[in-house]
Amino acid sequence: MPELILKEEVYQVIGAAMDVYYTLGRGFLEPVYQEALQIELARRDIPFEAQKLLKIEYKGQHLRKEYVADFVCFEQIIIEVKACEGLTGRDEGQIINYMKATQMHVGLLINFCSQAKLEWKRYVI
């Protein structure tokens, strides 16, 4: 069985997200979870950049339009935070596009407001 890419790093980030979820519960808006996750990542000494600007390239040229990823952890993992009933194809498309734009191979989509538990998905391209 092949080894998962950045397995330990993803484990650390999801552990931080679970702590935020179990402390705050569900029902807050996305900025609350973003701020709490930022605090938790710092407490755990997980290297991260919050609100990371992403440059988009088209046929070798940078576009003026930039997107902002919620977090980049370990300089290799894009993290997108959501606070919604459930993740959709649009959410998945967003994280995959962020990964392509940055040429990062691992992304995490984390939803703090799903019904029963913290909802998260790991993407590798």
Image: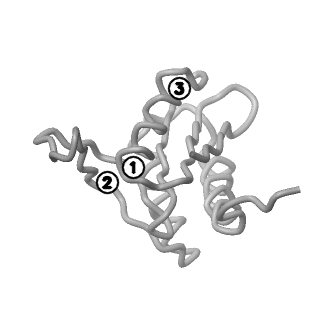
Residue type, mark 3 in image: Cys
> Residue beneath label 3, please?
84
Who comes first in sequence, dot 3 or dot 2? Answer: 2
Residue type, mark 2 in image: Gln
Residue 33: image x %, image y %? 48, 46
Residue 111: image x %, image y %? 58, 36
Q: Residue at x 29, y 46 (%)?
A: 68
Who comes first in sequence, dot 1 or dot 2? Answer: 2
Sort mark 3 into few (<14), some (14-19) or many (20+) by Cα contacts within 10 Å: some
By what rule are the colours in the image chosen? one colour
Residue type, mark 1 in image: Asp
The numbered disc on residue 70 is 1
Instruction: Name the residue at the right extreme.
Output: 1
Residue 46: image x %, image y %? 54, 73
CB-based contact (under 8 Å), mark 1 and mark 2: yes
The numbered disc on residue 25 is none
76 displayed left or right of 61: right
Q: Which quadrant of the rendered structure holds the N terminus?
A: bottom right
Question: Callout 3: helix, strand or loop?
Answer: loop
Sort mark 1 into few (<14), some (14-19) or many (20+) by Cα contacts within 10 Å: many
Query: What's the distance in space between the residues labelled 3 and 2, CA to CA?
Result: 19 Å
Q: Residue at x 43, y 50 (%)?
A: 34
Sort mark 2 into few (<14), some (14-19) or many (20+) by Cα contacts within 10 Å: some
Query: What's the distance in space between the residues labelled 1 and 2, CA to CA?
Result: 5 Å
